[in-house]
Image (tube, rainbow, N blue to C red):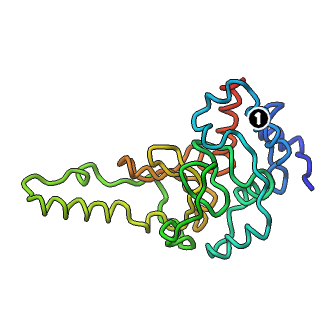
Amino acid sequence: MWTACTMADLRRHQWLATEGFVMVEQGRWDAAQIRERLSKVGARPNSRSVFGVNGHRFCLRCPASEEAIATVEQRLGVTLPPSYRLFMSEVSDGGPGPGYGIFPLGCSGNTADDPTPWADWQLEFPSRPFPLDEAWNLPDEEFVCPPGLSAGQEEDWYEAHDKKYFDPALEAGTIPIGHLGCAIWVLLVVAGSRAGEVWIDDRANDYGIYPAEPCKFDDWYLSWLEEVEAKTF
């Protein structure tokens, strides 16, 4: 059962206006409202112009069952952040979202519509606290191979660089929840003081790992929805 927002809650979320997405006092998604908003956007003729729409087509999925969520939490060794957990269990098990959509529970891939189950290498340290507190990248000079190396030495340099740069420990305490294209991955922090935040893994393009703006999962999702509503109105 969903409860109504108080007037104070509504005032705190004035930016959502009359059609806004609200969070009830317990922090639960107003699932009926968000599903309705997504359906309205998806039905607009110009919704096909939204970036990444071919990866989710604004198609809502059945919410994930408590049993399915508990199974994933047991595998990860963590309790999923409340805002993400409630989105998956009350709104949609993946589907419409930033980039090419939100992956279904326990899945990754290139798009929400073409998911594959998590691979073991994607979840090496899911219960270890996320190690970053601010945007991270290597210094510029560490991207430049030193001159004068032989072909073999150069190959060894790149191998060592990649081993350091793509160290799985930098993704500890996260799960992949989306893809923005060009090998830019959306990570949800599930362990540590940053749990519930969304971070972007842009190492494939040499931009490191940095927090999304806004970085809280619910704010991040709502910001995207408000943007696509405005663009397709």
At x 82%, y 39%, the residue is 36
| Figure check: 57 above or below 151 | above
Along the line of sight, which residue is nearer the eye, 203 or 4? 203
Helix, strand or loop at label 1? It is helix
Along the line of sight, which residue is nearer the eye, 94 or 2? 94
Q: Residues within 10 Å of mark 1 (few under 14, many from 20)?
A: some
At x 58%, y 48%, the residue is 111
Relative image position of residue 49 (x, y in whole percent): 61, 28
| Figure check: 148 above or below 22 | below
Along the line of sight, which residue is nearer the eye, 164 or 38? 38
Image quadrant in which you'd find residue 156: bottom left
At x 61%, y 62%, the residue is 195
| Figure check: 101 above or below 127 | above
Q: Is residue 165 left or right of residue 31?
A: left
The count of marks equals: 1
Relative image position of residue 232 (x, y in whole percent): 69, 25
Say which residue label 1 marks.
16
Q: Is residue 185 left or right of residue 28?
A: left
Going by the numbered disc 1, the residue's amino acid type is Leu
Along the line of sight, which residue is nearer the eye, 23 or 163? 163
Relative image position of residue 174 (x, y in whole percent): 55, 63
Q: Quadrant of the C terminus?
A: top right
Q: Quadrant of the N terminus?
A: bottom right
